[in-house]
Image (tube, rainbow, N blue to C red):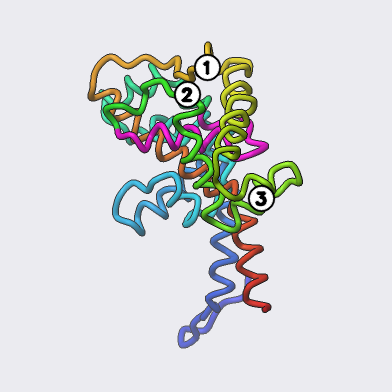
Amino acid sequence: MPEVPANCGIHLETQVVNLLQELSRKRLPRREKLHQDFLDVKRELGRIPTYLELHLMGRSKRSGYRSEFGSYIGFLYWAELLSPAEGEVCVRQEAWLRDVEKTIMNKSYKMIVLLYMLERGEAHWMDPITPGEMARFFHTYLTEKEYRKRKDFSEKDKLALWEWNEKTAAEVEKLIDDMPMSKWSGAKGSMTRFEDGVFSLNAQVEDAEEQALLYRWTKEICLYRLHAYFERRKLLISSEKKLL
């Protein structure tokens, strides 16, 4: 094996160092790689990152934590980063956390429903709702940003819904009834219920502390899923504007 003279040193370009680090990371088992990527972000922030922060700053694909651990909170439980009390809530609410994390999103509609519920605060976020009471919120969320409107509200049958009026209100209410609420509650293993025009959650909490904790975790997942869903469209529109 050749020897390096005593007065010589090896200087690696930054790109080479990064490549070597990446190759080293890929040799790790899948879960350990996800864990290491998480620790890198945690070290940079000086605290446990939110799900959205991990998505924006981490190296791993966004689906990794969901596919390996059921949910981001499930990962935190696996990594022993939850307190004993939080761990008990995680186990008890696993079905709900998995549902929020994994429910199919062909549109953003389900998460907009959930976001409306969360906007009411930790004390009331689990209270039942109706399509009518959240119709204006639903419409505003989808039309206030161009990238949202162009992704989920631009089909021919929805162009007439861009302007809010009495007719629009009725159509949006029907849309919420027909799609996110009916489809989510009707999915296999769903933790939601939609009966007699009222949408509610099947998750049960033991006390206000558990409700507040579940609120925080649910909001993290909801915000992450909405961002990830619209991310590509947002970047595309930003690129189009730069070219103009």
Residue 162 pos. (x, y %): 61, 49
In the current view of this chain or complex, which residue is farthest to the bottom? 7
Q: Are marks 2 and 1 in contact (CB under 8 Å)?
A: yes
User: At x 63% / y 19%, what residue is drawn?
Assistant: 187
Residue 12 pos. (x, y %): 54, 77
Is 130 part of what is drawn in magenta? no
Residue 166 pos. (x, y %): 55, 38
Return the disc, 2 or 3, that comes first in the chain's sequence.
2
Q: Amino acid at mark 1?
A: Gly
Query: In the image, which is nearer the foreground, mark 3 or mark 1?
Result: 1
Q: Do we see residue 135 in this rendering?
A: yes
Q: Which residue is mark 3?
A: 151
Q: Badge 2 local density, few (<14 within 10 Å), some, or many (20+)? A: some
Region of the chain picked out in magenta, as a range? 100-121
Q: In this rendering, would 177 be left or right of 141?
A: right
In the current view of this chain or complex, which residue is farthest to the top? 196
Mark 2–mark 1 distance (CA, rounded to whole Å) = 6 Å
Where is residue 157, by image quadrant?
top right
Q: Secondary structure at mark 1?
A: loop
The answer to which of 167 and 153 lies nearer the viewer is 167
Residue 8 drawn above or below residue 206:
below
Where is residue 188, by image quadrant?
top right
Q: Which residue is mark 1?
A: 197
Mark 2–mark 3 distance (CA, rounded to whole Å) = 25 Å
Is 111 part of what is drawn in magenta? yes
Q: Which residue is mark 2?
A: 130
Return the disc, 2 or 1, that comes first in the chain's sequence.
2
User: At x 46% / y 41%, what residue is drawn?
Assistant: 137
